[in-house]
Image (cartoon, rainbow, N blue to C red):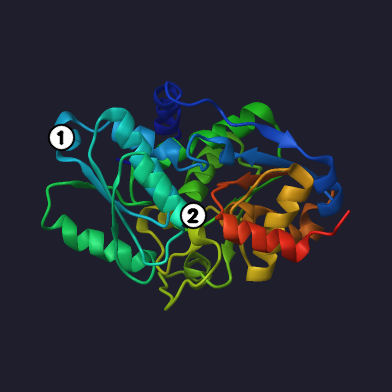
Amino acid sequence: MDVSVQGILQARQFIYQYLKPTPLLHYPLLSRELGCSAFIKHENHNPTGAFKIRGGLNLIGNLDAADKKRGVIAATRGNHGQSVALASSIFGVRAVIVVPEGNNPEKNSAMEAYGAELLIHGRDFDEARAKVESMQRETPMRYIHSGNEPMLIHGVGTYAVEILEDLADPDFVFVPIGGGSGAAGILTVMRAMAPRVKVIGVQAEQAPAVYLSWKKGADTTTESADTIADGLATRVPFELPFSLIKDSIDDIVTVSEDELAWAVYEVFRTAHNAAEPAGAAAVAGAVKLRNQVAGKKVVLILSGGNISSSLFQGILSRYAVSD
């Protein structure tokens, strides 16, 4: 199955039975500080607090009866796993989720609350993913990769259509890139429906596999992905999303750990929303390209709000100024 606008429009009809479109809101204070007209697409307002639920609903809800009976298995740092867990709960499917050691305990608890069986393995997402792929050879369960799934990209791409319905003429869209499913969905929609819109990907400097692959024109694996942005922390570009990103995206920028942390604070201060570092990456990216976006209409994808309490407390205490 190819990724297409038609698939995304079909996904809308299905997933809107289970969730509502998320708001696209203009923030004057953030706009003033970024020097542009800034709009946040609030994917953190989805039931799992992240955009991934769109893909989980579309994929798992449309599995055939045999696959649903077999159950599903996935690897995650949290948001993909919560998507798989909640969608599986809705459709009565057994879900086994593998997370790496030291994963966000609040994301782990959320996955278990949705009914998933949690296994812990590996030092990072890619080792957890390798464990799932080895288990797949021994179990009949349906493996749900967090990027290499057309039905998943069709689901997450639905928020790009919502952007164009709410804001007919954006100039830029900034989207975080971990595995790249969100960027792939946005590019599929924008290139077909609004080709003048510039799509900018944002990666963590300490997890730059997609950025390096894009610059070199060949898949590049990094030795580590040690970033506070767990939603961006992959060492390997995903084949399907990267095939859609590499020739279509206008630019990819990388941001430091300090820039990610500051962006979390900036979202809270100017928009009064909690953003996980991956979710705030778009804001950090817009700062990097401040001169290019000056005076333009800029959409910032707040891809997730599932920040741990301890990290959020630390960031607020670092940047907040007493009244």
Question: Mark 2 Cα within 10 Å, few/some/many (few <14, many 20+)?
Answer: many
Q: Residue 35, which numbered label?
A: none
Residue 56 appears in the rendering: yes
Q: Which residue position is annotated with label 2?
A: 245
Mark 1–mark 2 distance (CA, rounded to whole Å) = 34 Å
**Secondary structure at numbered mark 2:** helix
Whether the residues at callouts 1 and 2 have beta carbons within 8 Å, the answer is no
Task: Please state which of residues 117 and 164 is positioned toward the viewer in this rendering.
Answer: 117
| Residue drawn at point x = 41 percent, y = 63 percent | 237
Tell me where residue 304 appears, x and y as whole percent: 55, 47
Quarter of the image holding residue 52?
A: top left
Tell me where residue 121 appears, x and y as whole percent: 29, 66
| Residue drawn at point x = 63 percent, y = 27 percent | 165
Question: Mark 1 Cα within 10 Å, few/some/many (few <14, many 20+)?
Answer: some
Tell me where residue 202 appears, x and y as whole percent: 60, 59
Task: Please state which of residues 277 and 176 is positioned toward the viewer in this rendering.
Answer: 277
| Residue drawn at point x = 65 percent, y = 53 percent | 282
**Secondary structure at numbered mark 1:** helix
Q: Which residue position is annotated with label 1?
A: 69
The N terminus sits in image quarter: top left
Please name the amino acid that badge 1 sits on.
Lys
Q: Is residue 46 left or right of residue 29?
A: left
Q: Is residue 30 left or right of residue 131?
A: right
Q: Is residue 95 left or right of residue 20?
A: left
Please name the amino acid that badge 2 sits on.
Ile
Task: Please state which of residues 31 and 309 is positioned toward the viewer in this rendering.
Answer: 309
Q: Nearer the viewer, mark 1 or mark 2?
A: 1
Above or below residue 164? Residue 323 is below
| Residue drawn at point x = 84 percent, y = 53 percent | 33
Tell me where residue 306 appears, x and y as whole percent: 54, 49
